[in-house]
Image (cartoon, grey):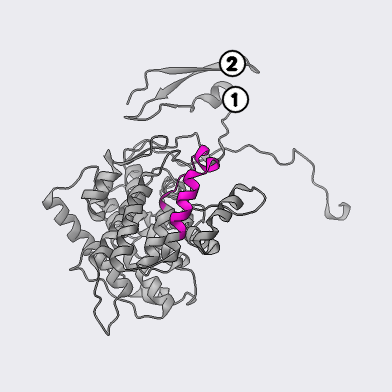
Amino acid sequence: MSEAQNVLLSDPASGKSVELPLIHGSVGPACIDIAALPKATGHFTYDQGFIATASCKSAITYIDGDAGVLMYRGYPIEQLAQHSNFLEVAYLLMNGELPNAAQFAAFDHEVAHHTMMHEAFRTFLFGFRHDAHPMAMLTGMIGSLAAFYHHGLDLEDPDMRRLAAIRLIAKVPTIAAACYRYSIGWPLRYPRNNLEYVDRFLHMMFEVPSEPLQLNPVVAKALDLLFILHADHEQNASTSTVRLVGSTGANPYACVAAGVAALWGPAHGGANEAVLRMLAEIGRPQDVGKAVERAKDKNSGFRLMGFGHRVYKNFDPRATIIRQMTHKVLAELGVNDPMLEVALKLEEAALKDEYFVSRKLYPNVDFYSGIIYKALGIPTEMFTVMFAIARTVGWVSHWLEQSAEHDSKIGRPRQVYVGATKRDFTPIASR
């Protein structure tokens, strides 16, 4: 990176000016370092939602929204989706390079042997209402890991930080499956460490003591693909939350629990649930045209969920990959889902409509992921939990990266105060 160039900013009101350095990454647009701005001019910047503000330097994920590009550690998502698997991608995100055979075997063994939950977790889990939302349970359960792995956690020790990351990658699927089984009254299933990562999770989710689970390989492949696509996505709301909490030196399990809470929002990880509800509301393929017209009417209150993206101004590259897998899963499993027909009609109609084309409202990854989850037998309320399992890898990778920085600062955004100006207190009897 180079910081040789400067940008000169002038304030006509005060007559002051300041030279601010340009920060160049390895790829992508340069950023203006505004750290000296307040001292030089007395002004801060205002950027609601941090749309135009970089809060950190990261070497993990790169997105070019205009070109529809997503890369993990420099590898295009299309190549990883075709040739890799989720656990290998997890190693890549954590360590910066793809593993060789020996490194992957060691990593796989390490993750597999941290999958068990402490038995006290059962008591904690059983304290939730049986009809609690799985994301509420997941947030609490992950946060409680801080109570189990607090003593002896030296955040200055890279090996201990790495162990915390491994524990989270290993245990979150176990916790997620336990939350699901508790919600439907099934006995908890212990992880089978002789299985691969995704297969192990599916067995914990769906296997019952009375009969072994016959798992279709396409199911595991589809879920593995979804996990890869959801593993990381730069400085989104939940990842930024993990970094913000992590900047305080908080316990890593608490940091990830905060990320889960942020992910739960319907504008973030809950978007694929919203897509399914929208498709159900439309109901029939022949009603898609009416739905499109309603979506264009600002007064209708109806929105097309799963179209457009805050970052991608072109086609979401993940959507292209997942669309192909959607057709493969439904064909292999023999699923005749009317929702898919509605989805395909909706996609076709929106991509031909000038209103959506001019605004570049292309289908995003949430548009198809909910349909795949539904085809795999995963209930709607578990969709965001599935997202959280995958994104845990990204969260811990960013936490590790941040924790290794020597010049890391505690997050402290500024604000524009719009409240009352100074006024004097009046006793209650006089008000």
Question: Looking at the image, which residue is at 42% across and 45% down?
Answer: 247
Question: Between residues 376 and 394, which one lies in front from this camera angle?
Answer: 376
* Disc 2 element: strand
Residue 315 highlighted magenta (yes or no): no
- State the count of labels: 2
Instruction: Say if 89 sits above or below 224 in the image.
Output: above
Earlier along the polypeptide chain: callout 2 or callout 1? 2
The x and y percentages for residue 55 are 44, 37
Q: Which residue is drawn at 34% across and 39% down?
A: 405
Question: As drawn, which residue projects farthest toward the front?
Answer: 286
> Residue 294: x and y, percent?
61, 52
Discs 2, 1 touching: Cβ within 8 Å:
yes
Numbered tag placed on residue 16 in the rendering: 2
- Magenta segment: 342-365
- Kindly identify the amino acid type of the residue bearing the numbered disc 2: Lys
**Residue shown at the point (34%, 58%) measured from the top left:** 326
* Coordinates of residue 254 in the picture (x, y in percent): 42, 57
Provide the secondary structure element on which disc 1 rests: loop
Quarter holding the N terminus is top left
Residue that carries the numbered disc 1 in the rendered image = 42
Question: Which residue occupies the foreground of this view, 17 or 198?
Answer: 198
